[in-house]
Image: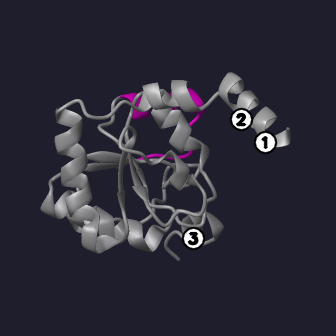
Amino acid sequence: QDCVGWSSYAKNWSFVKEALDVMCGELQMTGVLVATKDKQGRKACSIPASCDGLITQTTFLNQDEFFKYTRQSQFLFLPQVHDASPRVITQALALDVPVLMNKNIIGGWKYLTEQTGEGFNDIHDLKESIQRLRQNSAAGAYHPRRYVDENCGDQVSGERLTKFVL
């Protein structure tokens, strides 16, 4: 079967395929789909024909390789719903890369602000969200690294925990 199991469920693979058709077919975007090939690099999850030549699929990447791709990206696409606050969100933000995130994600929604990127609800508002993200990025409207510096990390989290406990 094509990309089944917990990982594809958590990453909302059925939606990803619809979204890729919009991104590749309608918007002619290029990109990288991380960890959508088996360990041997032979079998890949199927993607829409509209993505032929536009999308690169990889095996699981080590952190350095993932960061290299992320730094080169206009944004990090997070279609997940059943993935409570994926670590890649804060990694992208720390690398100063905005996010395009599913607003229905169980826990990572807290990182989605006017400084960090755009959200979408489903396939019906995805294209509009992508266009807004691209326009705002070109205008320099996002400051994901600044958001991380001001809202995350040991110092900020420690102060927040202290206030909560006391």
The first of marks 2 and 3 along the sequence is: 3
Q: Which colour scheme is used?
A: one colour
Mark 2–mark 3 distance (CA, rounded to whole Å) = 33 Å
Depicted 39 relative to depicted 123: above or below: above
Q: What stretch is highlighted in magenta?
A: 57-71
**Residue that mark 3 sits on:** 9
Q: Where residue 40 sits: x, y (%)? A: 56, 49
User: Residue under circle 1?
Assistant: 164
In the image, 4 versus 19, the foreground residue is 19
Q: In 3D space, how far apart are the residues under numbered discs 1 and 2 (Cα atoms)?
A: 6 Å
Proximity of marks 1 and 2: CB atoms separated by less than 8 Å? yes
Q: Is most of the magenta stretch helix, strand or loop?
A: helix
Res. 31 visible in picture: yes
Considering depth in this image, is 160 or 154 the residue closer to the camera?
160
Q: Is residue 23 above or below residue 90?
A: below
Give residue 97's position: percent from left, percent from top.
38, 34
* Type of amino acid at the residue the image marks with label 1: Phe
- Residue 138 position within the rendered picture, expressed as x and y whole percent measured from the top left: 17, 34
Q: Which residue is drawn at 26% across and 34% down?
A: 141
The amino acid on which the numbered mark 2 sits, given as a three-letter code, is Arg
Using the rendered image of the protein, determine whether residue 53 is visible from the camera's viewpoint: no
Q: Tell me, yes or no, whether the highlighted magenta stretch contains residue 102.
A: no
- How far apart marks 3 and 1 lie (CA) works out to 34 Å
Residue topped by disc 2: 160
Q: Most extreme residue toward the bottom, as rendered?
A: 1
Instruction: Please name whichever residue, 95 or 108, is drawn nearer the observer in this view of the structure.
Output: 108
- SS category of the residue bearing label 1: helix
- Residue extending farthest to the front is 166
64 drawn magenta: yes
* Neighbours of disc 1 within 10 Å: few (<14), some (14-19), many (20+): few
Residue projecting furthest to the right: 166
- Locate residue 95: give its quadrant: top left
